[in-house]
Image (cartoon, rainbow, N blue to C red):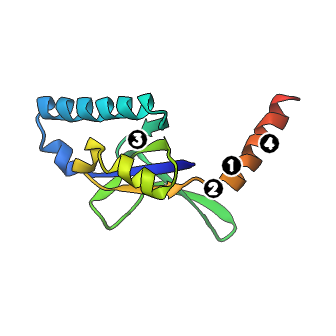
Amino acid sequence: MKFICLGYSDHSKFESMSEAEMQSLMEECFAYDDVLREGGHFAGGEALQAADQAVTLRHHNGSTEATDGPFAETKEQLGGILILEADDMAHAVALMSKHPGAKVGPFEIRPADETINAMIEARNQAHQNR
């Protein structure tokens, strides 16, 4: 099964870290990602820039409006995603509970919606075959 792991972090924690501390944390995270790769569990991922670089789109009164960033009431903002292959949710939790990124914020783990993803893949294939 595929799981999307949303990694959240409090960016003020990063601001208080020295460059060496930040580098050490990143190396720990990358090393654990390599462990996941070697086990066939790492299916991809992306780091995100800070939330203040984001734009949020909302449909309102018949038009789509763009506003700066997400305006969450929490210090923890989405910092990246990791796509994980695991047997089930318990396995995904066991794998991600060891990720060093959990030191700076929580991970939200959601099963991918394989039904809709299959529809998307079929559509992608149809467009490639044109």
Q: Badges 1 and 2: C-beta atoms under 8 Å apart?
A: yes
Disc 3 residue crowd, few under 14, some 14–19, many 20+, Cα 10 Å: few
| Residue behind mark 4 | 123
Sooner in the amino-acid sequence: mark 1 or mark 3: 3
SS for dot 2: loop
| Residue behind mark 1 | 117
Inspect the image, locate mark 4, and give the three-letter code of the amino acid beneath it: Arg
SS for dot 3: loop
Sooner in the amino-acid sequence: mark 4 or mark 2: 2
Q: How many marks?
A: 4
Observer-side mark, 4 or 3, equals: 4
Inspect the image, locate mark 1, and give the three-letter code of the amino acid beneath it: Asn
| Residue behind mark 2 | 113
- Quadrant of the image containing the C terminus: top right
SS for dot 1: helix
* Place of residue 14 in the rendered image (x, y in percent of width and height, measured from the top left): 20, 43
Residue drawn where x is 17% and y is 48% of the image: 13
Residue drawn where x is 37% and y is 40% of the image: 49
**Is 16 displayed left or right of 105 in the figure?**
left
Disc 2 residue crowd, few under 14, some 14–19, many 20+, Cα 10 Å: few
* Place of residue 46 in the rendered image (x, y in percent of width and height, measured from the top left): 45, 37
